[in-house]
Structures are given as structure tokens and as C-alpha cells.
Image (cartoon, rainbow, N blue to C red):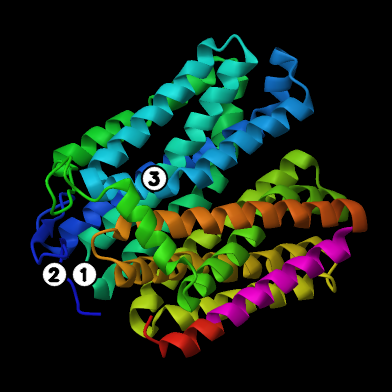
Amino acid sequence: MGEKEPGRGHADDGTTVVSPLGPETVPSAFIGVAILSLIWFVLSVYRITFSVSLPDFLEVTGITYTGVSVLFGAFFSGYALSQFPAGLLADRFGPGTIIASSILATTVALGSLSVASSYAHVFLAVLVIGSGIGSYRAVSQIAVAHTVPERMEGAALGLLTAANPLGYVVGPVAIAILLTKYDVYTVPLLLALVPVPLVLLAYLVNPVSIRSASKVGRGPTARQALSTFREHLCATTTLLVIAFGTAFTTTSNSLLAILPLYLVETTSLSLTVGGLYAGGIFGVGAIAALTGGVFRDRVGAIPILVAGFVTAAVALAVLSFVSSLPHVLATLAVFSLGLNSILPARDRVINSHASDCSDRHTGAMIGGLRSLCYLGGSLGAVLVGLGFARFGVTVGFNSLIAVLVIGAICVTALWNVENSRY
């Protein structure tokens, strides 16, 4: 692939697409990416708000655990399914428009929970919140592809993705503090106001209005985008990208749910302290996301992906042989470093493959690939969770090791198919 100019993209007809996240300089482009990362950090805190506030929520509303499970299903379904249409709309109206719209929808839906009076209202709000966050995540990745030079895209994606594990550290503490001072209906309203100044800051840096080369309203249609996506869906490279992306998401989603309980059951920690340790373990991943992105730009994405999958698998295998709390935490920290180094490299491969498939429908391809990875990963996490519940910790972790090994195999196969191009 040829190298893009800083802050520019190119349409099929050769016209230039100028990024709005800063002037055409690398420092300005990274300032824009930093703002996107800060917004993603806030939205990552939103993702775990429901888990942390669950006891208060159940006490106030009287909703059963079954009802809560449906709400979580709505959130993650919205998160996964929204990414393809968000990418499609980004191609048509520009990523900046979809970024602003997704944040607006998320904040309005979250704020509306402060006056929710029915289960239907809560269900719809949670669905919209999940969809808004998923849309933002996909389109922010598209914006990075438009904004920075190709040779530095890994570092930019590392900066963006590092916000997610940091959110797992700060989020539980911040939500817990808010819940001690305010009731469960006030907290959503307070949280909903946080992204507003960040969006305004993005506009002050330079209006966030990345647009496709086509005129608004006359860009690629949904039918064209779907046709392009179906055309490339069964290609070997596409299937391998989806497979290793699904392996990553399965592992990540499974550990988010299982890790706090694992620490409680295998150590003398309380659930609260175990949750804090789990957040710290994932927080270590922010370092891996940043360094993984930087090294991607030096050695390519494939070596980073292989190293990440193998490191995570070996760490989980070692976990069954350690028992003391320091050793458990150290092993899990190594696991987190390996797993989170995958994030920027995965996103770089998705961006590159989507661009190879179509210049005109790159956003739709990125969104579609991400949607399939998260749908497959969510299903995989459910199956792994059932394995933990039915057969115990040993079988559960062995299944995760197998998933990570499959991910490494798929990446190695991708390396052979694409001749190390990524």
C-alpha cells in the first residue's frame, strides 16, 4: 500500500479527503487522536457503569436478574450491530458527523435513565447507549485512518485503544464514589454531561467534519456497501481477520466477567477488592496498547499479533501452577500485557484490509468486520462462561487457551496468505 499524506485520505476518483482533526501536520493529527481517545475513555467508563451500579439498581427498581441479563444483552447487541451501519454512514456523511451523532445519542439516552419509569424505557435507553458507543468506536477508528500517515497509524491506534483498559481502572472507582454521594437516578445524568465539553473541544481544535469525497447525500448507498461487503466476506483474508478478531473478543469479554470472581474464589480477597485488582490488571493493558501500536509501525502488525496471542495463552497456562496472590497477580498482569498489545495491531489490519477491499466503502468494511468480530466474540464469551459454570475453572481457562491458540494460528495463516504485508 502506498503511504498517505498526513491528515489526508483518497477517494476512488483521486480527490483528496482532508481530515478535520488538525492541520496537515503529524503533531496536530495526534492532538485530534488524543481527543478521540479521551472521549473513548469516558465511553469506556459508561460500558462498566451498569456492572458497578447493579446492586443499587436492583434494590431501587426491583428488576430481576433475568431482566438485567436482557438489558446486558441489549447493550452488547447494540454495540456489535451498530458498527456496520455507522461505518456505512461515515462513508456517506463523513466520520465527524457520525461521531457527533453517536455521542449525542449516547448522552441523551444515558441522561434519560434519570427519569426512567418503566422497564421498556430502560431497555430502549440501554440499547441506544450500546449502539452509540459501538458507533463511536468504529468511526473513531475510521477517523484515525483518515488522519495520520500510514507509517504512524499503529501508534495512533495504540493511543486510541489505550483509553479502554484505563477506563476499567478509573471507572469502577469513579462510579462507586458517585453512588455514595448521589442516588442511582442522578448518577446517569451527571455522567451524561461529561462528553459534552470534549466534543466542543474537538470542534475548537478544528471542526470535526471529516467527509468523504462525495457530496453529502450523494455518497455510496447502503445497497452498494452491502454488495461490496458480501463480495469480500468469503475471501480467505477476510475470514482470517474475522477469526482472530473473534478469538480476541471472546477472551477479552470472558475475562471481564470472570476475572473478579476468579480472584475472590482463589484468594482471600473480597469482591470489591477483587474487582479493584481486576481493574488494575486490565489497566496494565494500556501500556501494552501504546507500545504495541508503536512497535506495529516498526515491525508490522503480524509479529505483534502472534506475540500477543502466544503471551496471553502461556500466561493462562502458567496460572494453573501458581497459587499465592502476588504470583497470580503477576501472571495476570503478563496476560493483560499480551492481550492488550493485540488491540492496535488488530485495528490496523482491519483498516488495511478494508481499504484493500474498497476505497469507496472503507468505512462500511471496517464497521462490518468489527461487527462480525464482536458478534462472534460475544457468542464465544457466552460459551466460555457456560464452560466455567458447568465444568469449573480448569476447563474454563483451558478453553480460553484453546481460543488464543486458534487466534495465533489464524494470524500465522494470514501472514502466509498476505506475505507479511501488514
| Mark 2 lies on residue | 5
Residue hosting label 3 = 85
Residues 124 and 252: in front is 124
Q: Residue furthest toward the right?
A: 391
Q: Is residue 49 above or below residue 357?
A: above
Q: Categorize mark 1 by other alpha carbons within 10 Å: few (<14), some (14-19), many (20+).
A: many
> Magenta residues?
392-411
Secondary structure under tag 2 reads loop
Query: Would you call the spot at circle 2 few (<14 residues within 10 Å), some (14-19), or many (20 or more)?
Result: some
Residue 361 spot, x, y in % from top left: 29, 58
Residue 16 horizontal side relative to residue 121, left or right: left
The structure residue drawn at horizontal position 54% and vertical position 34%, both measured from the top left corner, is: 174
In front of the other: label 3 or label 2?
3
Residue 387 is drawn in which quadrant?
Answer: bottom right
- Examine the rendering and report whether any part of residue 334 can be seen: yes
Return the x and y of residue 177 as percentages of the image width and height: 58, 28
Left or right, 12 with reference to 292: left
Image coords of residue 212 (percent x, y): 18, 52
Indicate the position of residue 92 as horizontal and vertical percent values.
Answer: 23, 46
What residue type is disc 3 on? Pro
The answer to whether marks 2 and 1 mark residues whose Cβ atoms lie closer than 8 Å is yes
> Label 3 to label 2, Cα distance in Å?
27 Å
SS at mark 1 in the image? loop
Label placed on residue 149:
1
Q: Is residue 236 above or below residue 420?
A: above
Q: Is residue 59 left or right of residue 111?
A: right
Mark closest to the chain's N terminus, 3 or 1: 3
Inspect the image, locate mark 2, and give the three-letter code of the amino acid beneath it.
Answer: Glu
Q: Residues within 10 Å of mark 3 (few under 14, many from 20)?
A: many
Residue at 53%, 21% in the rendered image: 187
